[in-house]
């Protein structure tokens, strides 16, 4: 298969290039384990790699990826919960200081939700996707209604942002997150990456709006983001 062959070729480049350049860091991580300060919840979309977007080094970021970068509400039943387990591990065991919900423009999962592509689909034919995307069904229905009243509304963009806000709200339903946030040891942040423009927008908690981040970093801007 040419796709897998391409992966092996990429590994060869990594092993002789980036791995050698970062060898000391990899050795330290192997001996001491990981201690990332940030958990990023990102979409599984192949075009959105948070380690590339934020240009991070190995061991710097703990990443959870799923369809449409969603966080379910805390639900302590007896089922398996992959995303919730990863969040719990990052907060209670790794003691991360920040959780970033990273959405992106032109999200296929969001588009499918708006169009009802997988609504009522049987398992194996979109049923798992439909059940997962039902997390944002109430927001989806509200935005659909608004778009029907005003055709100027970009429903897909609006739902991409609404999904990030919902995921942040759902994070706060986990007791260990609510406690850490109240203690000031954990900060929640929303962000959206525009694939076509390469622009990152960050949720301003004071205004409730997503604002573009300037690439001309100044000390004041960095301080504001850390305190958000």
Image (tube, rainbow, N blue to C red):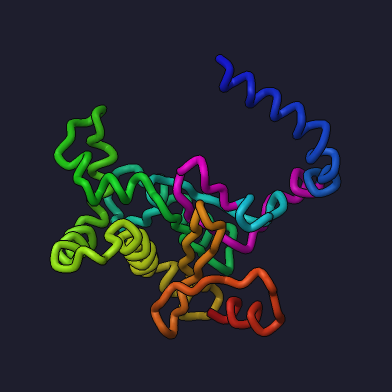
- Left or right: residue 146 versus residue 226 is left
* Residue 190 in view here: yes
Q: Report the front residue among 139 and 198.
A: 198
* Residue 170 in view here: no
Identity of the residue furthest to the front in this view: 152
The percent position of residue 109, horizontal first and vertical second, equals: 33, 46
Identity of the residue furthest to the top in this view: 1
The percent position of residue 210, horizontal first and vertical second, equals: 44, 72
**Quadrant of the rendered image containing residue 10:** top right
At a point 23% along the width and 51% down the height, the residue shown is 114
Please say if 221 is above or below 65. below
The percent position of residue 131, horizontal first and vertical second, equals: 23, 44
Mark count: 0
Please say if 178 is above or below 49. below
Quarter of the rendering occupied by the N terminus? top right
- Left or right: residue 25 versus residue 39 is right
Q: Which residues are magenta?
A: 28-50
At a point 58% along the width and 69% down the height, the residue shown is 97
**Quadrant of the rendered image containing residue 174:** bottom left
Q: Is residue 161 magenta?
A: no
- Left or right: residue 18 versus residue 127 is right
The percent position of residue 101, horizontal first and vertical second, equals: 46, 61
Q: Is residue 36 magenta?
A: yes
At a point 27% along the width and 60% down the height, the residue shown is 155
- Left or right: residue 82 versus residue 148 is right
At a point 78% along the width and 44% down the height, the residue shown is 26
Q: Report the front residue among 75 and 62.
A: 62
Please say if 217 is above or below 113. below
């Amino acid at each position: 298969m040419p796709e897998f062959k391409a992966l092996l070729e990429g590994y060869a480049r990594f092993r002789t290039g980036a791995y050698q350049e970062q060898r000391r860091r990899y050795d330290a991580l192997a001996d001491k384990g990981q201690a990332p300060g940030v958990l990023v919840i990102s979409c599984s979309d192949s075009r959105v790699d948070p380690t590339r977007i934020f240009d991070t080094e190995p061991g710097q970021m703990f990443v959870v990826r799923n369809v449409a970068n969603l966080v379910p509400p805390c639900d302590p039943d007896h089922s398996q919960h992959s995303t919730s387990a990863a969040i719990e591990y990052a907060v209670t065991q790794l003691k991360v200081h920040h959780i970033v919900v990273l959405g992106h423009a032109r999200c296929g999962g969001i588009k499918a939700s708006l169009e009802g592509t997988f609504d009522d689909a049987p398992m194996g034919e979109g049923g798992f996707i439909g059940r997962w995307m039902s997390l944002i069904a109430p927001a989806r229905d509200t935005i659909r209604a608004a778009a029907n009243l005003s055709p100027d509304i970009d429903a897909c963009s609006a739902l991409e942002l609404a999904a990030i806000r919902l995921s942040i709200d759902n994070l706060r339903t986990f007791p260990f997150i609510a406690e850490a946030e109240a203690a000031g040891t954990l900060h929640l942040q929303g962000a959206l990456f525009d694939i076509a423009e390469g622009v990152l927008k960050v949720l301003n908690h004071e205004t409730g709006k997503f604002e573009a981040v300037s690439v001309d970093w100044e000390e004041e801007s960095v301080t504001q983001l850390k305190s958000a």
